[in-house]
Amino acid sequence: MVAYAAGRKADISVNKMRAITLAGVIPDVDSVSIVFGIEAFKNFHGGPVHSILVGMILALVIALGFYLYTRENVLLWSIIGVFFHLLLDIPNTLNYEQYFDGLRYFWPFSDYRIALQNVVPNPEAWHLAIVTAIFGLSIVYFVILARKDAYPWRIWFDEKKLFRKKEDTT
Ligand SMILES: [Zn+2]
């Protein structure tokens, strides 16, 4: 939602909106490690895929995909999307099993880890406050958009067309 809001604010094209929102969630592809069991998930989620290097590679792959299909350069917005994800995961490190380590943003160059609990006292309170604020604002923003009939998912999928088609056939 934050990436989406940024994109809307910048008033970018639909392809760029798609790129920034896709890039905004792409580092969490490491969640697919769940297919190898909960232990693999705990060990992998929030690991190297949440590094700046892998994030930039993923942004590049997204931009390349868009370029091949649409001939539009969306690289900057893919990078911004990944950047938002990594940034917003900092107050979210308590949700990662390896939270005492923190996120490995500089993998593989440095073992430096960033984690909320290494920076502030009472990380649980900070985590709750920041995450609640982000979720709360996102919900408010969603409601504002919904009242304008501008549902965020429409950049990917317009359910109106689907219903229109159904009406036509009946
Ligand atoms: Zn993440």
Image (tube, grey):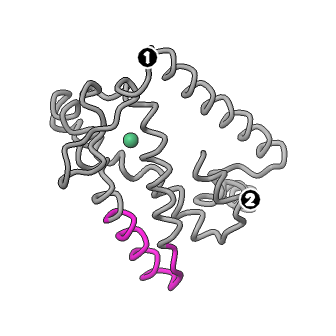
Residue 113 disc label: none
**Is residue 108 visible to us here?**
yes
Q: Is residue 76 magenta?
A: no
* Amino acid of disc 2: Arg
Comparing 77 with 69, the one in front is: 77
Instruction: Give the secondary structure at mark 2.
Output: helix
109 up-or-down from 95: above or below: below
96 sits left or right of 116 in the view: left
* Residue at (46, 47) in percent of width and height: 85
Ligand 1 - quadrant of the structure image: top left
* Residue at (68, 34) in percent of width and height: 137
* Amino acid of disc 1: Pro
Q: Which residue is mark 1?
A: 121
- Quarter of the picture containing the C terminus is bottom right
Q: Position of residue 69 (x, y in %)?
A: 46, 80
Lower position in the chain sequence, tag 1 or tag 2:
1
Q: Which residues are magenta?
A: 57-74
Q: Position of residue 11 (x, y in %)?
A: 72, 66
Q: Which residue is mark 2?
A: 164
**Is residue 170 visible to us here?**
no
Task: Tell me if the residue at label 2 has its CB under 8 Å from ligand 1.
Answer: no
61 up-or-down from 141: above or below: below
How much space separates mark 1 and mark 2, taking CA atoms? 54 Å
